[in-house]
Image (tube, rainbow, N blue to C red):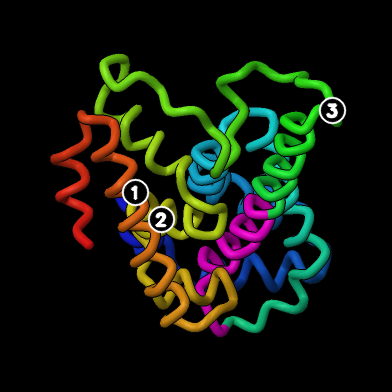
Amino acid sequence: MSGSEGMTRRDAGDDNQLMSRISRQDKAALQALYLAYHGKLMRFALRVVRRPEDAEEVVNDVFMVVWRDAGTFEGRSRVSTWLMGIAYRRALKHLRKETSRLRLVASGGGERDEPDQYLESAEDDAPLPADALEQQEVADVALKSLPADQRLMVELALVMGHSYPEIAEMADCPVNTVKTRMFHARKRMRDALKATGLGTDLADALGA
């Protein structure tokens, strides 16, 4: 089920009421919103940051922002879109921080303190042997080849099922910027998939 399909099953008015109550420091309302959206947000965060503890930190950060800034929510968008926008920014910050840390490690300026499977520099990952990859693993390698901003947009569009206007709102950028990033992301993923030798069908499905 895509993200958009999941959102239509919740009543926007109910979510708006929860936000109004949270703005008045209603902890029960925050708990209700948390239970409603934790799974969706965790799914997104876990795909992006990989480690469960980091994903949980991203999600917890989202609800800390909700608790602090609920009064600024004006209802111009769906609550779910607003939450995903916060998650987008938190995940992007995490990816950029991790990429900087990995570059420091690669230059000899830091210590490698995490298992290799969690090290996800978008530009510095060594390709895995093609014959050791299943289709999903091939797709994940292609995703890792993307810069952080492009990768998050691909996750939101192709995995979470959000429309380009929704993503533009989450990323606080014009729709044309989303289209441009997605165009370049698809091309880069297609090239990365074809390079594995196993991703030809997936690459063709992505188009130009």
In three-dimensional space, the C-alpha distance between marks 2 and 3, rounded to whole angstroms, equals: 31 Å
Residue 190 drawn at (x, y percent): 27, 49
Magenta range is 76-92
- Magenta region's main secondary structure? helix
Nearest to N terminus: mark 1 or mark 3: 3
Whether residue 41 is visible: yes
**What residue is pinned by disc 2?**
154
**What residue is pinned by disc 1?**
189
Task: Identify the image quadrant of residue 11.
Answer: bottom left
Q: Nearer the viewer, residue 89 or 82?
A: 89
Q: Is residue 77 magenta?
A: yes
Disc 1 marks a residue whose amino acid type is Met
Instruction: Categorize mark 3 by other alpha carbons within 10 Å: few (<14), some (14-19), many (20+).
Output: few
Residue 141 drawn at (x, y percent): 40, 34
In three-dimensional space, the C-alpha distance between marks 1 and 3, rounded to whole angstroms, equals: 30 Å
- Picture mark count: 3
Nearest to N terminus: mark 2 or mark 3: 3
Q: Nearer the viewer, residue 182 or 23?
A: 182
The residue located at (62%, 55%) in the rendering is 87
